[in-house]
Image (cartoon, rainbow, N blue to C red):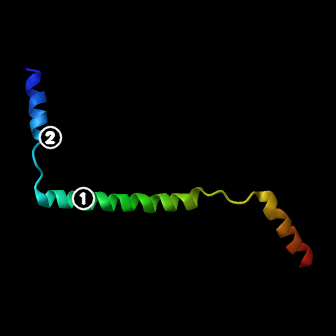
């Protein structure tokens, strides 16, 4: 009985996909890849470290002395 489900699984896996579904699947995969790339770009901006506070403080002190 254990061989029957395995055989049924391989038969289902080997069924040819209809062209319309194949085209839609390719379109959705391309769209998902584009979303992933956009997400990676957005995360790169978020994760980018800001300059250390020490570098920012002297500039602020200089402005205070001038004013």
Residue pointed to by mark 2: 13
SS type, badge 2:
helix
SS type, badge 1:
helix
Residue pointed to by mark 1: 26
Q: Does the CB distance between marks 2 and 1 fall below 8 Å?
A: no
Mark 1 crowdedness (10 Å alpha carbons): few <14, some 14-19, many ≥20: few
The single residue placed furthest to the right in the displayed view is: 65
Question: Residue at the spot x=33%, y=58% of the render?
Answer: 32
Q: Residue 52 falls in which quadrant of the image?
A: bottom right
The single residue placed furthest to the bottom in the displayed view is: 67
14 over 36 or under it: above or below? above
Residue 15: percent from left, percent from top: 9, 44
Residue 12: percent from left, percent from top: 11, 40
Mark 2 crowdedness (10 Å alpha carbons): few <14, some 14-19, many ≥20: few
Instruction: Residue 37: give its label.
Output: none
Residue 45: percent from left, percent from top: 57, 62
Question: Residue at the spot x=10%, y=30% of the render?
Answer: 7
Spatial distance from mark 2 to mark 1, Cα to Cα? 18 Å
Q: Residue 5 falls in which quadrant of the image?
A: top left
Residue 22: percent from left, percent from top: 17, 57
């Amino acid at each position: 009985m254990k061989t029957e489900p395995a055989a049924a699984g391989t038969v289902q896996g080997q069924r040819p996909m209809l062209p319309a579904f194949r085209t839609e699947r390719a379109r959705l995969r391309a769209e998902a890849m584009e979303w992933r790339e956009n997400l990676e770009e957005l995360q790169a901006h978020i994760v980018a470290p800001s300059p250390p506070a020490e570098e920012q403080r002297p500039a602020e002190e200089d402005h205070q002395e001038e004013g």
